[in-house]
């Protein structure tokens, strides 16, 4: 079974590329991912897959001109060929006077993110976990979803003397339970180790939502008080990161926070930072330029504090990289991958009790951007939406479309959950998010289910 290739072999292959770079600077980024994915529907496994992918990405920089070449040939010969191709592209590329060059050597913090048992989880182990999940559905209900276990290792070496390497692993399980009279419920878990995944708890949570969601009724569009569970809040925070927290978009005036440094942009109980080194997340300790990662405060007690940077956006802003570069070539600029929204002291029950007439929302889907500068997005509720009346959940409602400014939602946030959950859209992204209560949230349409 595949496992880590290791830093020694990576160093040997990287040196082969660095030796043939020619004049200028060169960088070798190594990404090796492997793992299994088991999907199920109608409470039966219908697909079990295994994948492994090894990538070398060589960047050559000459007089401000950059060339990038990628190969799956993880060998000295493959690295040399990629370096030669990158060098040829750099010779004819347009110069970028804002790119400051590659970083020199810097110490990288040590973090323990790799669990061998998780990376080596067998199809039989995943099948047994899914069986336990399905067993919680109850008569008349069935489950669909996926269970993935994976390992990865990332290494970076450059001609300036920087060399860093880190292995990591993670397990994720999600389920939608449906049946009966139109009810559906959703639950998911993301964890650094498969041992931290409780499939019965995932199944029970989704099944309870489905049972409670039987016979949903119509609800008119309009402004509601809302209690948003962590999965729904994660969608808002992820889109806010895309629309506002990148240093390049901020400097170029495209960010929803452009010109708002030091201003209040959310309720005082809202604080968001990015920290790949936080014990509660899954981040690696350096970015894809080899810059060590560190905590960056983005919104502190409702005030916009700043953005994340890679080397190019830092040069634009007259500051230093915060360690948030993405793999080259990257026209979008830096991005925060390990957001943490500060918890409060409320439970979801507290939030419901504080709501006169509103909605309890499990999650959103089909979410898209409407107005980037105003951070307005639109999407649908899904898999568990309930009406709250006089501090009590009274009955399920059919799904509604929302059209809402994320910043306005955060301005109207008056309660924050005391517990948080991990959420991630792709392997190197893992954000920790609590539930929130907003006093006003706009719903602009409804569906027939």
Image (cartoon, grey):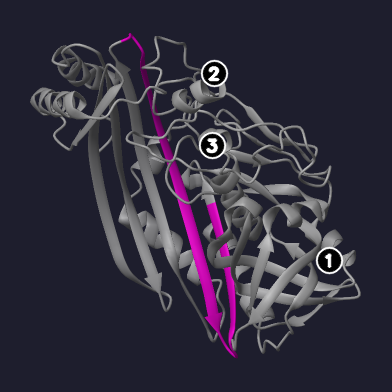
The secondary element bearing badge 1 is classed as helix
Q: Is residue 267 above or below residue 138?
A: above
Tell me the crowding category of disc 1: few under 14, some 14 to 19, or many 20 or more residues within 10 angstroms, Cα based: many
Q: Please state the extent of the stretch shown in magenta in the rendering.
A: 160-189
The CA distance from mark 2 to mark 3 is 17 Å
Q: Quadrant of residue 438?
A: bottom right
Q: Earlier in the sequence, mark 2 or mark 3?
A: 3
What residue is shown with label 1?
352
Q: Which mark is residue 320?
A: 2
Q: Position of residue 188 (x, y in %)?
A: 55, 59
Q: Earlier in the sequence, mark 3 or mark 1?
A: 3
Tell me the crowding category of disc 2: few under 14, some 14 to 19, or many 20 or more residues within 10 angstroms, Cα based: some
What residue is shown with label 3?
252
Q: Is residue 267 above or below residue 22?
A: below
Q: Which mark is residue 114?
A: none
Q: Position of residue 309 (x, y in %)?
A: 53, 28
Q: Nearer the viewer, mark 2 or mark 3?
A: 3
């Amino acid at each position: 079974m595949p496992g880590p290739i290791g830093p020694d072999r990576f160093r040997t292959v990287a040196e082969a590329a660095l030796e043939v770079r020619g004049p200028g600077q060169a960088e070798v980024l190594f990404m090796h991912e492997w793992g299994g994915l088991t999907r199920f529907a109608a409470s039966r496994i219908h697909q079990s897959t295994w994948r492994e992918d090894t990538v070398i990405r060589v960047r050559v920089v000459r007089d401000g001109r950059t060339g990038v070449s990628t190969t799956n040939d993880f060998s000295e010969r493959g690295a040399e060929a990629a370096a030669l191709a990158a060098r040829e592209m750099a010779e004819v590329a347009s110069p970028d006077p804002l790119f400051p060059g590659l970083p020199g050597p810097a110490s990288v913090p040590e973090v323990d993110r790799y669990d061998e048992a998780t990376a080596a989880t067998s199809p039989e182990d995943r099948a047994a976990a899914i069986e336990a999940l399905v067993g919680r559905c109850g008569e008349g209900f069935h489950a669909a979803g996926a269970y993935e276990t994976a390992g990865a290792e990332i290494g970076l070496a450059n001609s300036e003397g920087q060399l860093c390497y880190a292995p990591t692993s993670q397990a994720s399980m999600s389920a939608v339970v449906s049946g009966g009279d139109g009810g559906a419920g959703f639950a998911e878990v993301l964890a650094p180790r498969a041992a931290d995944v409780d499939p019965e708890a995932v199944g029970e949570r989704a099944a309870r939502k489905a049972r409670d969601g039987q016979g949903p009724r119509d609800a008119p569009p309009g402004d509601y008080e809302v209690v948003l569970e962590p999965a729904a809040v994660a969608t808002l925070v992820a889109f806010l990161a895309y629309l506002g927290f990148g240093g390049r978009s901020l400097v170029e005036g495209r960010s929803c926070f452009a010109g708002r440094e030091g201003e209040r942009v959310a309720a005082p109980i809202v604080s968001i930072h990015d920290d790949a080194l936080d014990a509660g997340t899954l981040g690696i300790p350096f970015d894809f330029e080899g810059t060590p990662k560190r905590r960056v405060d983005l919104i502190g007690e409702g005030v916009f504090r700043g953005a994340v940077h890679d080397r190019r956006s830092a040069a634009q802003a007259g500051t230093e990289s915060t360690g948030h570069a993405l793999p080259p070539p990257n026209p979008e600029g830096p991005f925060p991958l390990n957001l943490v929204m500060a918890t409060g002291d409320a439970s979801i029950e507290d939030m419901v009790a504080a709501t006169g007439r509103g909605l309890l929302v499990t999650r959103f889907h089909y979410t898209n951007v409407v107005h980037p500068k105003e951070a307005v997005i639109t999407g649908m509720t899904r898999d568990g939406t309930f009406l709250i009346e006089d501090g009590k959940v009274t009955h399920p409602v059919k799904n509604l479309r929302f059209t809402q400014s994320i910043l306005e939602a955060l301005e109207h946030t008056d309660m924050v959950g005391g517990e948080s959950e991990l959420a991630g859209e792709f392997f190197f992204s893992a954000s920790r998010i609590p539930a929130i209560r907003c006093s006003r949230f706009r719903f602009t349409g409804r569906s027939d289910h």
